[in-house]
Each structure stands twice: as C-alpha cells, then as structure tokens.
C-alpha cells in the first residue's frame, strides 16, 4: 500500500495513510529499534540497501565530522514537526493535561531527567511537597523539558498547547539515581519499561478496537510496520548504541546506515514533516518543507558516538567467561555469524528466516525479508532477546541455539557461554 499520495495529489497525505496513521506509536528509535530504534541520516539521494550488503556500504557508517553536541540536542529534543500528529490528530496534549499525572507517566515507562529539575523542584519532591498524582505537575515537568522524549509547549496558565515526541522517547532511559524512573539520562539505551501502545491508547481519537490492539503490545514493544500493513506483530525496542561500523542497524537490515532508519522513523512513525521513499515497500511520502533531512547528519554523528555500556563490575564470572569465549569460538559455533569486534556479519550478509527458529512473520513485512545478525556488545543490558523478545534471558538464548542447531553443549559449556556473553 502506498503511504502517501504522489503525482497529481502532490504533497498532500494519502487519505488511507491518514486513516491508518491513527494506529501510530512512538519511536525513534530507533530506534523499535532495532527498532528497533529507535535512527536516521543520509543524503537526500540515499540508496536502497540490497538484500546482501557489500563492503561499499560500510563507508556510510563512519562517524561523520559533524557536531556531536548538535546531534545530541536533535536526539533529545527535536520533534521534526511531529506535533501536528500528536497534537492535532491524536490530541495527546489534552490527554496529558487531563489524566496523565507523573505517577501515571512513570507507570507506563516514561522517564524524568533529574538534571533538568531546578534545585527548588528537587527539594520540593524530596520533601513530598509535590503532588505526583496531579496532571498539573506533569505540565510543569514538560515546561522544564524534564520528560525524556516528550517535547511540549506550556502556556502561562499551565495549559499544554502543543506536544510532540523525540528519538529519546524509545531510545533513552535514566539511571534511577533520584528515584525509580527519575535520574540521569542514558542515551541509546532501549526503554524496555516504555509502553507506547498504552500511551497511544489514551487518545480520544481511537476506536475501542484500535485501543485493544495498542494495549496488546505491552512494555518495551512497538510495531513500526503496523500503520502500513495493519498486521499486529510488535518487536522489542532495540538499543541505539554500539552502531559505529555497522550499517545494517535494524533487525532486518533494511537500509545502508543509521540515517535510513532515522528517516523512516522520523517520517513514518513519529510523523515528522519530511520525505521518505522505499520502493520495496511501496512507500513514498513527500512533504514540504522537509524538516528531517537537514538534521540527519548530526543525529547520526551523535548516535555513532554512543558506545555500548560495559558490564557492571562483578556482574559476571571472569574465569567462566574465558571458558565461554572458547565455547563461543568453538563448539558453540557462535562466531560463524557473530564476527569481529562488532560481533556481527551484518556488513557482509543477511540471513534467510527459513534457516532460523524464530517467528519469521515480522521479517516478511520488511524491505529485505531477511534477518540481520545482532551485534553483541552490551547484550547484558537489554533482555528479553530476539526481535520478538521470545527468550527472556541469555541462558534461554543459549539453550535455544543448542537445541535447534543440535550443538550438543554440556550444561557447563552453556553456563560458561552465558558468562562470556554477560562480559561483552
């Protein structure tokens, strides 16, 4: 289905797209991800990724000599003009003002940037002088730019007049250093607490049937194809860190770099004002002026600067991890696909879903209809695993591979392999 009108209808959005756009959710991700997420950048003449990527595409992934600080601001605060959707179509400004207290916001996984709070506000919260069950407090937090991934205009009467979302909504969390859900930002970390479907389902513009679909997704999951094909199959929100040197950054490696996915998310999921064309999916959205393209370079530069977080001290057994490294490169056969320092062969090839043991239905909805090998740096940080979150722990992942590929690993080998993965 074509996502936007072209030809005689010019820049106007296709009615079918607007109808299905109601089904949208947040992301940037990504950012979902892989999503997720939460990830756009490239020239306006960006090429379409082939099914089997070649070495030439790797050049797109070098960190560009642009202002990473500017990219950080874009990642955290730029809506790409998506307020027209979240405010004018979904009326989320009214929803937030009327029913979303800080307690409700935290319950659906929204995060608060403690460093954006003035000392007086911090002191008031610590002294229980702030009503966290009052939506008016949420408006105050929005005025302070303290709600991660949500950007709003709040007037002098504390009314929310405009609201939009940013990349950080799905692809940032906080360290909980002030309180659960409140702390210093951790950009690039997937917000697996976020329940974007439940947030969208608060919109008065949705039918009960639509709300039921959104509410079925659950925390940490998002479907970045639903508004195009109407199929309900959410994937986990992926991390947006550790992507330098990797050009196939999504679960299915649809584009040649981070910019491709950023553009896709900003235009088709966040509903920012820009252009996105994907002939393989019959998508052609053209909007003028394009508010997305000029921000992609700096955004990618920032994202590629985000390193995968090292494992916390004492979180794995170093001796077992060394034994697990031997299993990884030997009996476990992991290094056949999880290659090099990035632990992925995504720059060389994609994989036929028929040869693996995960549900292939999401892959068939994408441009490549293939799977990318997931990079493993920081894998300790973002359970559950696989695109659909079908393995809760790394032990589950190892057992699944052992069983389906008939590896014959011993219990000790599997346990050691888990410790090695936790060390990455």
Image (spheres, rainbow, N blue to C red):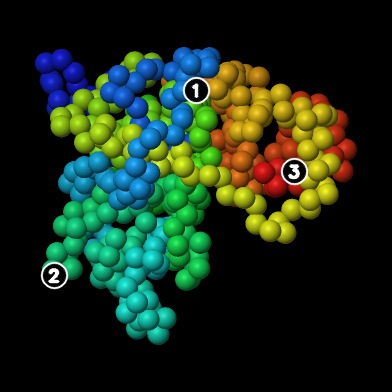
Q: Secondary structure at mark 3?
A: helix
Residue bearing the label numbered 2: 157
Residue visible at 49% across and 31% down?
249
Toward the viewer: 64 or 37? Answer: 64
Picture quadrant where residue 328 is located: top right
Pointer 2 with pointer 3, Cβ within 8 A: no
Residue bearing the label numbered 1: 58
Q: Outermost residue toward the front?
A: 65
Image mark for residue 420: 3
Q: Is residue 379 visible?
A: yes
Picture quadrant where residue 74 is located: top left
Q: Earlier in the sequence, mark 2 or mark 3?
A: 2
**Mark pair 2, 3: CA separation:** 55 Å
Toward the viewer: 23 or 383? Answer: 383
Q: Classify residue 23 as left or right of residue 371.
A: left
**Mark pair 1, 3: CA separation:** 27 Å
Toward the viewer: 387 or 325? Answer: 325
Tell me the quarter of the image containing the C terminus: top right
Q: Earlier in the sequence, mark 2 or mark 1?
A: 1
**Mark pair 2, 1: CA separation:** 51 Å
Q: Classify residue 255 as left or right of residue 66.
A: right
Where residue 266 appears, as percent x and y from the top left, is 31, 37
Eye-nearest disc, 2 or 3: 3
Q: Secondary structure at mark 2?
A: loop
């Amino acid at each position: 289905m074509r996502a936007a009108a072209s030809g005689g209808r010019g820049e106007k959005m296709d009615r079918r797209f607007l109808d299905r756009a109601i089904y949208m959710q947040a992301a940037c991700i990504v950012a979902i991800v892989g999503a997720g997420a939460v990830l756009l950048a490239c020239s306006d003449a960006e090429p379409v990724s082939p099914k089997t990527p070649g070495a030439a595409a790797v050049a797109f992934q070098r960190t560009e000599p642009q202002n990473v600080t500017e990219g950080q601001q874009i990642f955290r605060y730029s809506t790409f003009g998506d307020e027209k959707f979240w405010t004018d179509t979904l009326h989320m400004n009214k929803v937030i003002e009327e029913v979303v207290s800080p307690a409700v916001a935290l319950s659906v996984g929204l995060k608060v940037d403690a460093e954006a709070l003035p000392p007086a506000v911090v002191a008031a919260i610590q002294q229980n002088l702030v009503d966290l069950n009052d939506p008016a407090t949420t408006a105050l937090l929005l005025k302070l730019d303290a709600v991660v991934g949500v950007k709003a205009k709040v007037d002098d009467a504390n009314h929310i007049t405009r609201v939009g979302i940013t990349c950080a909504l799905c692809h940032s969390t906080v360290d909980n250093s002030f309180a659960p859900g409140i702390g210093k930002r951790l950009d690039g970390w997937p917000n697996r607490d976020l329940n974007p479907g439940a947030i969208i389902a608060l919109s008065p513009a949705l039918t009960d049937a639509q709300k039921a679909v959104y509410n079925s997704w659950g925390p940490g999951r998002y479907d970045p194809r639903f508004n195009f094909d109407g199929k309900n199959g959410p994937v986990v929100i992926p991390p947006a860190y550790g992507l330098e040197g990797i050009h196939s950054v999504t679960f299915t490696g649809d584009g040649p770099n981070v910019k491709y996915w950023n553009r896709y998310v900003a235009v088709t999921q966040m509903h920012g004002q820009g252009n996105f064309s994907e002939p393989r999916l019959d998508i052609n959205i053209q909007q003028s002026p394009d508010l997305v393209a000029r921000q992609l370079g700096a955004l990618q530069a920032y994202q590629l600067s985000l390193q995968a977080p090292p494992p916390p001290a004492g979180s794995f057994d170093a001796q077992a991890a060394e034994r697990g490294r031997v299993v990884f490169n030997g009996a476990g056969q992991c290094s056949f696909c999880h290659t090099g320092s990035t632990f992925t062969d995504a720059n060389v090839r994609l994989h036929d879903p028929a040869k693996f043991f995960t549900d292939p239905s999401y892959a068939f909805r994408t441009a490549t209809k293939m799977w990318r090998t997931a990079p493993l740096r920081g894998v300790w940080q973002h359970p559950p695993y696989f695109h659909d979150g079908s393995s809760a722990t790394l032990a589950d992942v190892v057992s699944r591979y052992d069983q389906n590929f008939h590896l014959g690993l011993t219990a000790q080998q599997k346990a050691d392999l888990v410790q090695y993965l936790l060390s990455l």
